[in-house]
Image (spheres, rainbow, N blue to C red):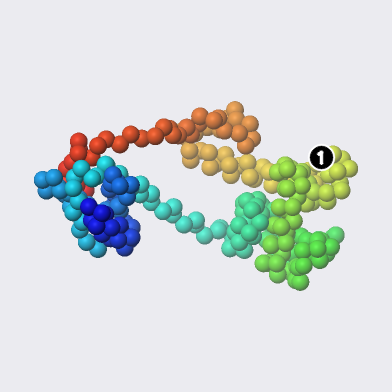
Amino acid sequence: MKRAMLMIAALAALAAPASRADYAVLRSGLRLHITGYETSGDRVRLTVNGGVIEVPADSILSIEREDVFPANPPDPPPAGPFGNLIRAAAEKHGVDEKLIGHVIAVESNFNPRAVSRKRALGLMQLLPRTAVRFSVADAFDPAQNIDAGTRYLKELLDRYSGNLPLALAAYNAGPEMVERYRGVPPFPETQKYVRQITARLAQEKSAANKLLPGISTAGFAAGSVPADLFRVDSSPAVASPFQTDLRRRTD
């Protein structure tokens, strides 16, 4: 018996996971990745990748179905100009790529050569001191500008604990103005800037929610979800003895 177990273990080690398979759980504690099985009297023939093993039926505790989950479809290519650069910066710095796109749209209308009256430069309108701070060699280079602007936006989001209106106000008017007025400054330009971007994000969120009619977030505080909304039963499964349901697999 010991020799048989060693042979099984050796074959299991060589067996590569199949596209669909199950596990045979043996009394010895070994779990074999199998692609099928059939019975012959008091013996069971287990099919593994690379061969067949025959074991006593009473040595098998259960056959467990392997969970097979389809791979998530790849994200669609980013829409709009500079989409790939926006996505790269979003993933690098942990900022919503839609937020970055809306900031660029309001700041420069996607013009990489834009220069404001205050000498803010490029797509995300970096002030010269901000460009120097983030080691931007060419503020008109889309990749450098988007990366630095996203990094600065992330810094502001962290500074204001994720409060988007405050972070946007600081991006537009400067953190010192947000501190002075203890909120969004009363400047028409800044208030319009914050409203434009937050409204666009809200519209997109509303449109996305319409695609999920069975789930409503109405009444939930921001960032909160009822504890039992996606309850998972964690009680241990009790496997029936294999011999009570011994049959040839047909699937």
In the current view of this chain or complex, which residue is farthest to the front? 2
- Residue 58 seen from this side: yes
Residue at horizontal 61%, vertical 61%? 88
Left of 47 or right of it: where is 136?
A: right
- Please state which of residues 158 and 189 is positioned toward the viewer in this rendering: 158
Which of the 4 quarters of the picture holds residue 81?
bottom right
Q: Is residue 21 above or below residue 85?
A: above
Amino acid residing under circle 1: Gly
Residue at horizontal 24%, vertical 63%? 50
Q: Position of residue 226 (x, y in %)?
A: 55, 30
Q: Position of residue 200 (x, y in %)?
A: 64, 45
Q: Position of residue 139 (x, y in %)?
A: 75, 68
- Please state which of residues 137 and 108 is positioned toward the viewer in this rendering: 137
Left of 188 or right of it: where is 101?
A: left
Mark 1 residue crowding within 10 angstroms, few (<14) / some (14–19) / many (20+): some
Residue with the mark numbered 1 = 183
Q: Position of residue 158 (x, y in %)?
A: 73, 48
Residue at horizontal 35%, vertical 49%? 68
Left of 144 or right of it: where is 68?
A: left
- Tag 1, which secondary structure? loop
